[in-house]
Image (cartoon, rainbow, N blue to C red):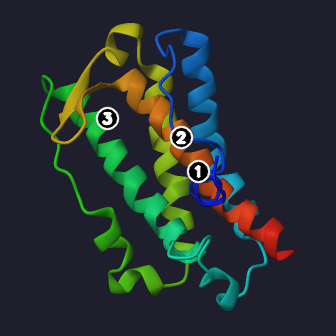
Amino acid sequence: MTDLEELRYPIGRFTPTATSLPGIRAAHIQTLRELPDHLRAAVAGLKDAQLDTPYRKGGWTVRQVVHHLADSHAQAYIRCKTALTEDWPVVKVYNEAAWANLPDSKLPIDGSLALIAALHESWVALLELLGDEDFRKGYTHPERGRIDLAKALAMYDWHSRHHTAHITCLRARQGW
């Protein structure tokens, strides 16, 4: 892995796993349950200048990463509920990079941290009530094709750990 690759993907790229097994799904759900606390710990004590530091050259700032997690996971939660209530709906894509540059990406992170905590509380509760047949339901992503809820869950487990690692690795490199 190159240095840039390691900075971009500190836990490696997403690799789909056999998510049909209930034990693996439970581990993915646990990651979603723990994200709010892990993210709060990752940003604890950071000053504005540190929050405005990119995790790599040309990358998002810590502040943008936190806001992105709130945006992305809100999208994922809605996609999950849509997949449970419609037959393989086509979901709307959004421009993550453009969203990360909207004026609200410069706001304090407390609102996004609170949103992530509330969102994950509801999302985890829902996921824990689903049966095997529910995880075979899914949606069609215009750029990624058909994604069942088992795979989506695995993706957001990875996404949670991926962006938290951007912050914790930056802190380790900077000695914060």
Residue 79 in picture, x, y percent from top left: 27, 40
Residue 9, disc? 1
Q: Nearer the viewer, residue 12 or 21?
A: 12
Q: CA distance from mark 2 to mark 1?
A: 6 Å
* Residue for badge 2: 13
Query: Can I make out residue 176 in this image?
Result: no
Residue 113, disc? none
Residue 38 in picture, x, y percent from top left: 71, 53
Residue 80, disc? 3
Q: Residue at x 56, y 47 (%)?
A: 160
Q: Residue furthest front?
A: 2
Residue 140 higher or lower than 36, as above or below? above
Query: Can I make out residue 132 in this image?
Result: yes
- Disc 2 marks a residue whose amino acid type is Arg
Q: Residue at x 38, y 82 (%)?
A: 104
Mark 2 touches mark 1? (CB < 8 Å) = yes
Q: Which of marks 1 and 3 precedes in the sequence?
A: 1
State the quadrant of the C terminus.
bottom right
Residue 67 higher or lower than 39, as above or below? below
Question: Total of numbered circles in the picture?
Answer: 3
How many residues crowd around disc 1 within 10 Å: few (fewer than 14), some, or many (20 or more)?
some
Residue 148 in picture, x, y percent from top left: 31, 23
- Disc 1 marks a residue whose amino acid type is Tyr
Residue 29 in picture, x, y percent from top left: 56, 30
